[in-house]
Image (cartoon, helix red, strand yellow):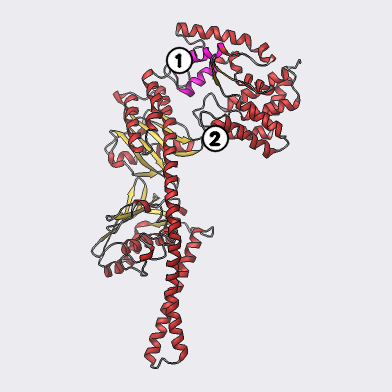
């Protein structure tokens, strides 16, 4: 059926305006990982144009064209979730969108799902091919591989080479095998693409024979027309097996990074991980000549080249780091390590979840890192981030499983604790009230004593209710921070002085040290509650003669608040549980009421409250503890320069 180019362009413009198509393109633009150079939003637009070209040529109906447009728009959307076997995800996304936008019958949704699933290459005796299951699938399959018969074939091959990280000659040989076995499925493609396919096969064979690039097209930023050398390709091929050999990643990652440093001819490398609050980065893994004392140290997530990479989700090749305006000089100033040049790439999984960043530092021999080095590090990072995410998810699921088991067991115990906490003062109140009401209390002094007992019981009940109400406020939507510029040293010193007497009564040494003049932004009242709860816990769980160290330190432009004790410590299995409401370390059956007595139990609200307040300040309450050797609680807030 004859049609003009103007009609084709108009149909393509109308397709781009369809809300269901715009939704798919928006997700591709926002969620597709940046390393998909071929399977990109541009490829999806290209398939949209091609499928309309083929469908108009063969006279498909308006409804058939619409279903093809939906299939084309969603056929690669599964790449936002995973790089392989993503057709099922793309088909699911298409069905969900058709249900959401409405107007499609079950048979039409099934047809779109089938055509997307059919885009998967299937290995047969004749090589990899696509097997259509219905009429419309043939058009999407021909459109998806339309560049095999067009002049832009070698440009698309270059993008695919960059995406896969394959050496060019290897990719060309695989492409030649595919093209020689490929057969066009629709009349339009047979008429318009078959001759171009033959031409591209001839050029491809010539390129393989001579080793010359048929279009002299090098992938962007590469210093070599042959892609990565075989040693790097071999390393990347083995990398998934290495990284997935254990779910305990630190040792595995450091081994992999040692290879990375060697193959990139670099001095050192480090992995930064984003903390749960999203405001801090920690030096998680180091290798090469990087300072070991940096491990587990933290820095603001918005500082330095690494902060820029995280925010913009783009890689950086900085040839002179010290003169780069984004460079965070505080690291160099606090260590003997000097950064001259660096590669920094984001660690982002499924195009959205930010885990951190990877840095490779100081090219050996006084040279700078090349674009090929950057491409190699990017390919390494794609494998690394998947392993990191898998290990993190496994660790979190195991922690959650153990936490739920323990919390379920402790639930009944805590009901007993709460009953005890309320029953004791209620009994005192009841007994005192009965005696006073009976008139049997004779002397005025005894009446005064009974009144005081009654008041103490009421006071204790009021305190219990206040604790419960306070936690409800802190963890509900009602909490509002009164932000102001604070002198952190003065804040800490005030809290410290209020605990000198309780520490003295318990024969516990309480020491304070800090850096005067450190300023932060926060709510003075709520931060005082956090520090008071941490010091109260430290006194209660440190035996007589023990030591509590309360410190304020300045670390890489972060004010670091630290409470460290030589107390009973916390078992590893309970680290994640102690921030839960009503949870106290130890057996709840051995609970005893008290204020600062050794191992006296409360309602288990102090740490839950402290954690909630710290999170509201955009930070995270950290714990380092070993049973029998004490605990360290700490959090960090950005320091303010006046």
Residue 162 at x, y = what percent?
48, 22
Q: Residues within 10 Å of mark 2 (few under 14, many from 20)?
A: some
Front residue of 485/437: it is 437
Instruction: List x then y, in percent, for residue 587.
Output: 36, 61
Predominant SS along the magenta part: helix
* Residue 167 appears left or right of 506: right
Highlighted range, magenta? 154-180
x 42%, y 79%: residue: 428
Taking depth in this image into account, of 513 and 132 the one nearest to the observer is 132
Q: Residue at x 35, y 65 (%)?
A: 590
Q: Which residue is mark 2?
A: 31
Residue 496 is at least partly visible in this image:
yes
Q: Position of residue 629 (x, y in %)?
A: 27, 55
Task: Determine which quarter of the picture holds residue 337.
Answer: top left
Left or right side of 153 for 186: right
Q: Quadrant of the N terminus?
A: top right
The question of residue 541 being in magenta is answered with no
Q: Which residue is mark 1?
A: 170
């Amino acid at each position: 059926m004859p049609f003009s180019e103007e009609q084709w362009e108009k149909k393509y413009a109308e397709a781009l305006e369809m809300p269901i198509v715009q939704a798919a393109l928006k997700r591709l633009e926002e969620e597709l990982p940046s390393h998909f150079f071929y399977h990109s939003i541009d490829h999806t637009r290209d398939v949209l144009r091609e499928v309309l070209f083929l469908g108009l040529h063969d006279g498909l109906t308006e409804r058939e064209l619409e279903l093809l447009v939906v299939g084309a728009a969603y056929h690669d959307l599964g790449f936002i979730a995973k790089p392989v076997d993503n057709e099922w995800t793309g088909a699911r996304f298409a069905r969900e969108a058709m249900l959401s936008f409405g107007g499609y019958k079950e048979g039409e949704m099934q047809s779109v799902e089938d055509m997307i699933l059919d885009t998967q290459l299937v290995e047969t005796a004749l090589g990899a091919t696509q097997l259509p299951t219905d009429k419309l699938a043939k058009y999407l399959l021909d459109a998806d591989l339309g560049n095999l018969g067009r002049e832009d074939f070698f440009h698309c091959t270059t993008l695919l080479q960059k995406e896969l990280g394959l050496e060019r000659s290897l990719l060309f040989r695989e492409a030649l095998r595919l093209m020689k076995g490929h057969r066009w499925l629709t009349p339009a493609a047979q008429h318009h693409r078959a001759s171009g396919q033959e031409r591209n096969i001839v050029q491809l064979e010539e390129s393989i024979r001579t080793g010359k690039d048929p279009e002299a097209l090098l992938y962007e930023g590469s210093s070599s027309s042959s892609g990565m050398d075989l040693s790097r390709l071999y390393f990347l091929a083995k990398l998934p097996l290495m990284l997935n050999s254990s779910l305990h990643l630190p040792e595995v990652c450091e081994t992999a990074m040692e290879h990375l440093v060697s193959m990139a001819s670099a001095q050192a490398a480090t992995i930064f991980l984003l903390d749960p609050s999203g405001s801090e980065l920690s030096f998680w893994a180091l290798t090469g000549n990087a300072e070991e004392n940096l491990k587990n140290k933290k820095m603001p997530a918005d500082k330095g080249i690494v902060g820029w990479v995280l925010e913009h989700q783009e890689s950086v090749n900085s040839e002179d780091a010290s003169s780069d305006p984004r460079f965070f000089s505080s690291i160099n100033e606090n260590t003997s390590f000097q950064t001259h040049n660096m590669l920094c790439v984001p660690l982002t999984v499924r195009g959205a979840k930010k885990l951190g960043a990877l840095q490779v530092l100081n090219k050996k021999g006084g040279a700078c890192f090349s674009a090929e080095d950057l491409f190699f590090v990017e390919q390494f990072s794609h494998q690394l981030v998947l392993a990191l995410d898998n290990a993190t998810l496994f660790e979190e699921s195991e922690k959650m499983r153990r936490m739920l088991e323990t919390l379920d067991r402790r639930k009944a115990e805590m009901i007993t604790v709460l009953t005890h906490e309320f029953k004791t003062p209620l009994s005192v109140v009841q007994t005192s009230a009965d005696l006073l009401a009976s008139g049997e209390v004779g002397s005025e002094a005894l009446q005064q004593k009974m009144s005081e007992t009654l008041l103490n019981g009421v006071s204790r009940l009021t305190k219990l209710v206040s604790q419960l109400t306070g936690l409800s406020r802190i963890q509900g939507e009602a909490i509002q921070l009164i932000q102001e510029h604070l002198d952190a040293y003065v804040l800490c010193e005030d809290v410290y002085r209020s605990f000198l007497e309780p520490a003295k009564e318990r024969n516990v040494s309480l020491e304070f040290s800090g850096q005067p003049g450190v300023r932060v932004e926060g709510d003075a009242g709520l931060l005082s509650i956090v520090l008071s709860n941490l010091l109260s816990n430290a006194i209660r769980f440190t035996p007589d003669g023990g030591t509590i160290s309360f410190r304020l330190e300045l670390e890489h432009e972060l004010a670091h608040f630290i409470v460290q004790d030589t107390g009973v410590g916390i078992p590893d299995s309970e680290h994640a549980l102690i921030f839960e409401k009503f949870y106290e370390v130890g057996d709840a059956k051995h609970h005893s009421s008290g204020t600062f007595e050794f191992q006296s139990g409360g309602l288990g609200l102090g740490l839950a409250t402290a954690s909630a307040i710290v999170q509201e300040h955009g930070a995270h309450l950290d714990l380092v503890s070993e049973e029998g050797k004490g605990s360290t609680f700490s959090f960090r807030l950005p320091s303010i320069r006046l």
